[in-house]
Image: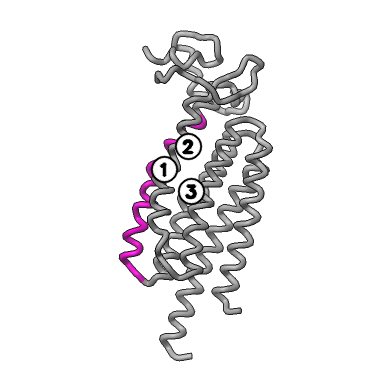
Amino acid sequence: MTLPELLWAVAGAIAVVAVLLILARLIAGPTLIDRLIASDVMLTTLILVVGAEMVVSGHTRTIPLMVVLAATAILGSVAVARFVTRAGDGSTTAGEGDDGRR
Amino acid sequence: MDGAEVTVSILDTVAGVLLVVGALLTLAAAIGLWRLPDPISRLHAATKPQILGLILVVIAIAISARSASVLLLLIPVVVFQLLTAPISAHMVGRAGYRNGDIDPAWLEVDELAADVDAAPSGELPGGTWSDEAGS
């Protein structure tokens, strides 16, 4: 195994551990905001892994995928943040937040 | 190895190191999601790989492809993240504050409270969403 291959393997192993930790936070919550942040980090990690895969495989075909992911990453968190509302029991759920008004 | 092979090996090694550092930043964010006590602090941890990690990986791709045009193609990725990451972080933090997920006691300085108090009051802490239409 050459040195670059070893580095790729190390980076991949670190990314797997990171994704598992993020996934655990995504499941555990406890609040919707925590899950929103975790899913944001997960999407960022996805962009990084798509980029890392290009380095490892030595191609540049998935650059458009990176561009699209980076440009649309905001939509999910903004959409959820807009429509977060408070349920009667004080817990947080996603629902009809603001009648579409600002 | 002749000179060209050594150069190739060095460039690939540099790209590999950049990938490892980018992965470490992601790991730092993941650990931060568990180690930090409240959603606002986790929001801080989440932004580490979003900009610096992405820039490192983009440079690694350009080095690996040995191409300046690939770097040009990747600049929009970084620009989009630079533009949108603060917006989404702001929206998430604001939504958390206004629906009560964020306890004002966690904050050293609560600059939003004065504005919320000045706005017409509603049932929710910080007023309802529609209250801010006139403010």
Label 2: which secondary element: helix
Question: Looking at numbered disc 3 in the image, what kind of residue is underneath it?
Answer: Gln
Kindly indicate whether the residues beneath marks 1 and 2 are on one polypeptide chain.
yes
Question: Looking at numbered disc 2 in the image, what kind of residue is underneath it?
Answer: Gly
Please tell me in which quadrant of the rendered image residue A58 appears.
bottom left
Residue placed under numbered mark 2 in the picture: A76
**Mark 3 and mark 2: Cα distance apart in space:** 15 Å
Q: Whole-percent x and y of residue B129?
A: 46, 17
Q: Residues within 10 Å of mark 1 (few under 14, many from 20)?
A: few
Quick check: marks 1 and 2 in contact, CB under 8 Å? yes
- Whether residue B70 is in magenta: the answer is yes
Q: Is residue A34 left or right of residue B59?
A: right
Label 1: which secondary element: helix
Label 3: which secondary element: helix
Quick check: can you spot residue B69? yes
Q: Chain of mark 2?
A: A
Kindly indicate whether the residues beneath marks 1 and 3 are on one polypeptide chain.
no
Q: Residues within 10 Å of mark 3 (few under 14, many from 20)?
A: many
Residue placed under numbered mark 3 in the picture: B50
Q: Chain of mark 1?
A: A
- Whether residue B28 is in magenta: the answer is no
| Residue at (54, 22) in percent of width and height | A95
Question: Looking at numbered disc 1 in the image, what kind of residue is underneath it?
Answer: Thr
Residue placed under numbered mark 1 in the picture: A72
Write down the region rendered in magenta.
B67-93
